[in-house]
Amino acid sequence: MIAGNLDLLMLLGLCLVILMGFPVTFLIAGLGVLFAYLGWALGVFDLSLLRALAQRIFGIMTNQVLIAIPLFVLMGTILERSRIAEELLEQMGRLFGTLRGGLAVSVVVVGALLAASTGIVGATVVTMGLIALPAMLRNGYGRGFAAGSVVTAGTLGQIIPPSTMLIILADVMSTSYQQAQYAQGLFTIRTISVGQVFAAALLPGLVLVALYIVYILFTAWRRPDLAPPMPVTLDKPPLGRVLVILLPPVILIIAVLGSILGGIATPTEAASVGAIGALLLAGLRLAPGKSGWPVWLAIAAIVALLLLTALVDLRLGRVQATETERIAINVAFALVALLVLGIGVCLVRAHRARILVGVVTRTMTISAMIFGTIIGASIFSLVLRGLGGDARIESLIEALPGGTGAALFFVMLAIFVLGFFLDFVEISIIILPLTVPLLLSMGLDPIWLAVLIAINLQTSFLTPPFGFSLFYLRGAAPPEIATLDIYKGVAPFIGLQLAAIFVIWLFPAIATTLPRLLF
């Protein structure tokens, strides 16, 4: 009986040891190895399957899509440490604060902007928890309402592109889509790209932002004591100041997302542009009283290089290059030299401001955690497949009455429940490869399905007891905010997440229109 149910015991053991507080990265890899040898001892697992581990790990570390993750993390960390988030919160709070619920609205707006420019949930939640939450409490906001607004706005970084979750999800969905087509006997295999998933998630992300703002304004109208307006004596910031604070991250967002959605650059290339752009913005902000001409020259060089690339063939080593192309190549070398000079100046300023070491260390830590978890989850899923877990799950889904709709509902419910205990990386790498190929073989649109799953996975950051955003805010919140206040405050927003899933389920065009137009 034990030998025939090792796959179920493996999943149960995963939930139990997570409840004991062990590090997830080492936990899932260790469980995989343990159950592999246990299955071998009971005669239900072939140890030769473990020979595929080296190839899997090599494939993860050389995956061109996943390489974008450290670059996006670097971009977000630079923007966080250069205090762009603090200035945005301050100015938006003064802009909207005189409305009922205006501070909460400003938190959601800034959360959306930071989501599109940083994509790091932890950094956004902690930053807003340290800055916005005390201001909301001083102004008389309800503790639960204020905490729920902050923690939910911080999770927008997982659904609004670019985000690490969407990158991982796009890679998993692409592989699952190919498997589904192979299983159907198709010879012409189609795939989906990160750009398509980014495009599909953009409108649903904005729908979520709209739902949050409508809920906040409605609650403030119905319960004025929960979200009173700020004193009208507070001066609103001048328009010029707002534009100075707002435009740089917006331009960076357009440069990164626009290059991906427009097909100009791959996600990895766009992420590198974003990281350099964030460093240049940080260089301007960290030394406002000093001469900014090297940085402005570097920014101008980037624009000129983009124009040259669009107009002239700059490939090196060509014998047939025309005189005009040779001149353009030499000009490009000069522009690159200006760019390197500007980057060097920004690195020196970041070092003198004592943030460079912190930025590099945090980027390395987050990237290592993500890749370590992906590798551990890959080991776990390989052993789970070897024990027959994939066949059991497929037979369970196929046996469900109600066809495709029931199968999709069951998978979405399973993801939602697992989100109470597991991180999005473990769910994406362990559970999705076992369930998504079967759903796609039933004829579901992979882009639409990716968005539904993305919003569901985003909810895992909010659901107790292991919602990561809850932990982030608990560490940054003032002492008067109790953990129960955070749980109560986030409950309505979890309902809004589920409502968004329902809306996109009923109206798939919200997710599929933009990628069909662009790709």
Image (cartoon, rainbow, N blue to C red):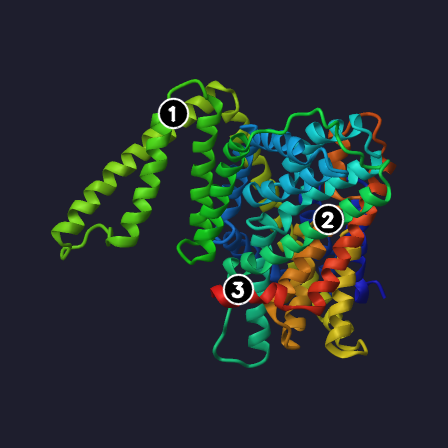
Q: Which residue is mark 1?
A: 292
The amino acid type of the residue labelled 3 equals: Pro
The amino acid type of the residue labelled 2 equals: Tyr
| Drawn side of residue 80 relative to residue 134, left or right | left
Q: Residue at x 78, y 44 (%)?
A: 466
Q: Say which of 386 and 154 sits in front.
A: 154
The answer to whether residue 261 is above or below residue 336 is below
Q: Nearer the viewer, mark 2 or mark 3?
A: 2
Q: Say which of 411 and 455 sits in front.
A: 455
> What separation in Å lies between label 2 and label 1 (alpha carbons)?
39 Å
Q: Which residue is mark 3?
A: 515
Q: Which residue is mark 2?
A: 212
The amino acid type of the residue labelled 1 equals: Gly
> What separation in Å lies between label 2 and label 3 (alpha carbons)?
24 Å
Residue, far front? 233
Q: Say which of 443 and 295 sits in front.
A: 295
Q: Earlier in the sequence, mark 2 or mark 1?
A: 2
